[in-house]
Image: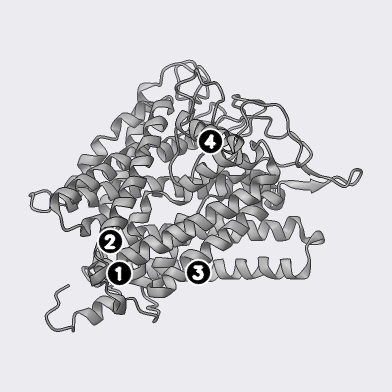
Amino acid sequence: MNRHVSGALRVVRSAFRGGSDEESFQFARFHDDVSNNESTEMASIPNGDAAGHKTSCSDDKVVWQLSDGLATPVEGDETEDKNKITEWQAGWNVTNAIQGMFIVSFPYAVLEGGYWAIFAMVFVAYICCYTGEILVDCLYEVDEASGKRRRVRSSYVAVAEEVWGPRIGGRIVYTAQIIELLMTCILYVLLCGDLLIGSFPNTPLDLASWTMLAAALLLPCAFLRTLKRVSLLSFWCTVAHMIINAIILLYCLTRAATWKWDEVLVRIDIWTFPISFGIIVFSYTSQIFLPTLEGNLVDRTRFRCMMHWTHIAAAVFKAGFSYIGFLTWGFDTKEVITNNLPNVTMRVLVNLCLVVKALLSYPLPYFAAVELLQDGFFGGRGVCPPCFEDGGCGGVGTGAGPLKVWAVVLRMGLVGFTLVLAIFLPHFAILMGLIGSITGNMLSLIWPAYFHLRIKCCSLRWYQKAIDVAIILMGLICAGLGIFYSGHALIAAFRGKETRPFQLQKAEFVPGRHV
């Protein structure tokens, strides 16, 4: 009993020591040094030769490496490294990645997809759990002499380079990362605008004005050199967000007597369900950092178990939250469910908390994108000069000099770029569905299955090959449909002819109902 209690206390203590990172990009580094109050360091670095060292500029965005990224330990071997993380700490990071604040749009996904959307939340969780496992499996090769598996690759990029070659593989994954990161930044800015206009609908400010106000608060991100304090604040905001989700669920449960059971339909609307599916896939995208996370586990044999319970928990919570949220408001469900709260005071408080959470979450993908662009174009190797006065590469913790003025201007320009796209693409759910259809399907479904099929082809059983092929085909079909219908919905929205789910079209003919 005492052993279990002490183990639980260690988990809680480690969680509160470290900050958390947002959505699907990075994970926290947990230190065992209790005296270090700011124990989470965020950085976007490539293949590390040793703990806390920055080397190449073309690899996956990861955190400060906790161990030799290219070492080849035998699977299951444990080394004495206080910087290693447990499966509980890894589970916190995966949970934070796949259960982020974008869940506030999931009840709207049920509006667009009905029961099929709820089924997709569970099904996609299972598929993404599987693709995460096979992607990590691609990091290993069997040693012919000993017959044991050894880790010979360190990242998503390394796997891509093994299949497509070092010249093409890294660039393809690099491009997908940049798109994913920048589009997520856009979603954060747009979410702030949606939440603010939902909180103060009677003010003369429109959505674009609120979005610009939120973006103005993000300009200091251009001066960021470390994300220690931001990630620590993000941890507490994540805790607050979990409390907000609980408040929304409790409110919905108090309305159980008026739940609209008959408004959740089985029929698929081909014009809106692909958008809903893209939203769901986007929410489960965590594969990009799983290789580094698995490489820093104390016991790597616990990786599969950790993946299983985190994805099961995510599937149950997302499906339950979305279903209950839609049952409460039915056809009146909005793109961001907190805007449905009838009590003005409650809605304003909840939305403002989410705005703060979004503002503090923005620096994480923004900083990762800056690091990738900086290392790729301004590392001093090409025609572009270094961004720092001393000519250093400029990664966090490298001791590089101050930023040059033009580098700060370019960083501010990147914030402005995300603002402009947020203003010109002011449709949160459609945009998220489009991102999920493009990069989400590629990073989470198609590429892991394809890499697994190519690298492990000789050792796979026939049914494993069939599963990989089925996932690839499903990903390609969903990506094609999602891009087409999300693009169609965006074009229709620009023309003032917003694509409406068939549920809303049906509701318009119900006497006495106004949508």
Between marks 3 and 4 in the image, the one whose residue lies nearer the viewer: 4
Q: Which mark is residue 327?
A: 1
Percent across and percent down for residue 374 are 48, 32
User: Which is more N-terminal, label 2 or label 1?
Assistant: 2
Element carrying mark 1: helix
Q: Are marks 1 and 2 in contact (CB under 8 Å)?
A: yes
Relative to residue 428, is residue 327 depicted above or below? below
Percent across and percent down for residue 9 are 52, 33
Callout 3: 10 Å neighbours few (<14), some, many (20+)? many
Q: Which mark is residue 252?
A: 2
Amino acid type at mark 2 = Cys
* Residue linked to disc 4: 11
Element carrying mark 4: helix
Q: Is residue 118 left or right of residue 192?
A: right
* Residue linked to disc 3: 478
Residue depicted at 49% across the width and 19% down the height: 36
Along the line of sight, which residue is nearer the eye, 119 or 381? 119
Between marks 1 and 4 in the image, the one whose residue lies nearer the viewer: 4
Amino acid type at mark 4 = Val
Image-quadrant location for residue 266: bottom left
Relative to residue 490, is residue 77 depicted above or below? above
CA gap between label 2 and label 4 equals: 31 Å
Between marks 3 and 1 in the image, the one whose residue lies nearer the viewer: 1
Q: Are marks 3 and 4 in contact (CB under 8 Å)?
A: no
Q: Are marks 3 and 1 in contact (CB under 8 Å)?
A: no
